[in-house]
Image (spheres, helix red, strand yellow):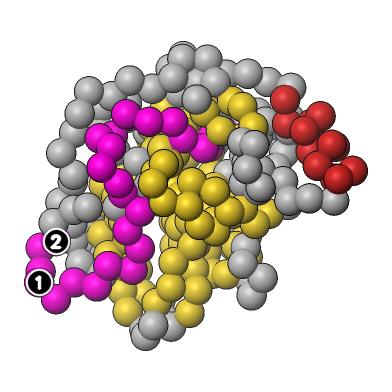
Amino acid sequence: MKTVLAAATAIFLVGTSSSHATILKDTIGGDTYGASSGWGVQNVGSSPSTQSIGLGFFAGTSTQVNGIEAFIGPQPGSALTTFTLGIMADNGSGIPTGTFLYQTNLAADSAHPVLLNNLNWSIGAGSYFLVAIADFATLNSWQFNTTQTGPFAYTAGDPNGNWLAANNYLPEAIISTENISAVPLGNPTLPSMVLGGLMMGWIASRRRAQRTQAPGRSA
């Protein structure tokens, strides 16, 4: 998977099992899984290329998260595809707290997006993040929606620290109070290379310019 830097400032539609479901977040566009680029969810130790992604969502009242679908897949050639997906609260500044309220360990699959049901994750009213953090030596990608931009969060050089706010193409996912059905699958073709060493120089130049950073992007 090719890791590049977005030039813009900083860096789920599915059926439900109930007509009364509340969709807390839906960023899945018209693309099939594997059909477009994504943000790197990868862990290469202290390297600047290490990055986690958090997609923000809001609950207007106390509820349960029961269904999640997320377009997270492995980068070709990665020896490991395991990662943690879970919910963190917003720390009040538009970034995750760094502490999971709920979490599950998964292995990314190039043929199928992540689909979780019957979670029973209870949350109060407020702002939260669906967070993906790669295990060490894992190189995954969270496909983004090129028709939806907005705020989300990412880390730079630390799997679960140094969280930063971004505003760019949104990671594709759906978060629901009820179980969900997967979107139709296409023919996944994830990008094939990973470029390293780009993040450090780019961050330095952005800091000199006192502008917002951008997350690492697969192309």
Could you tell me if residue 48 is visible in this image?
yes
State the image coordinates of residue 212 (x, y, percent, origin top left). 73, 51
Residue for point 61% across, 36% down: 6
What's the residue at 59%, 25% (across, down)?
A: 3
Query: What count of labels does the image hold?
Result: 2
Looking at the image, residue 132 lies above or below residue 196:
below
Q: Is residue 119 visible in this depiction of the protein?
A: no
Query: Which residue is label 2 attached to?
Result: 16
Q: Is residue 94 above or below residue 134?
A: below
Q: Secondary structure at mark 2?
A: loop
Q: Are marks 2 and 1 in contact (CB under 8 Å)?
A: yes
**Residue displayed at 38% across by 22% down:** 190
Residue 206, disc: none
Dominant SS in magenta = loop
Q: In the rendered structure, which amino acid carries the disc numbered 1?
A: Ser
In the rendered view, tell whether residue 206 sits above or below residue 102.
above
Task: Give coordinates of residue 165: x percent, y percent.
Answer: 65, 57
Percent across and percent down for residue 45 are: 69, 31
How would you rate the neighbour count of disc 1 (Cα within 10 Å): few for under 14, some for 14-19, many for 20 or more? few
Q: Front-most of 1 and 85?
A: 1
Q: On the picture, is 148 further left or further right than 14?
A: right
Tag 2: amino acid: Thr
Find residue 113 and report its horizontal and vertical position in percent.
29, 38
The boundaries of the magenta stretch are 16-42
Q: In this rendering, is residue 107 above or below 78?
A: below
Residue where numbered disc 1 is placed: 19
Q: Tell whether position 152 is magenta.
A: no
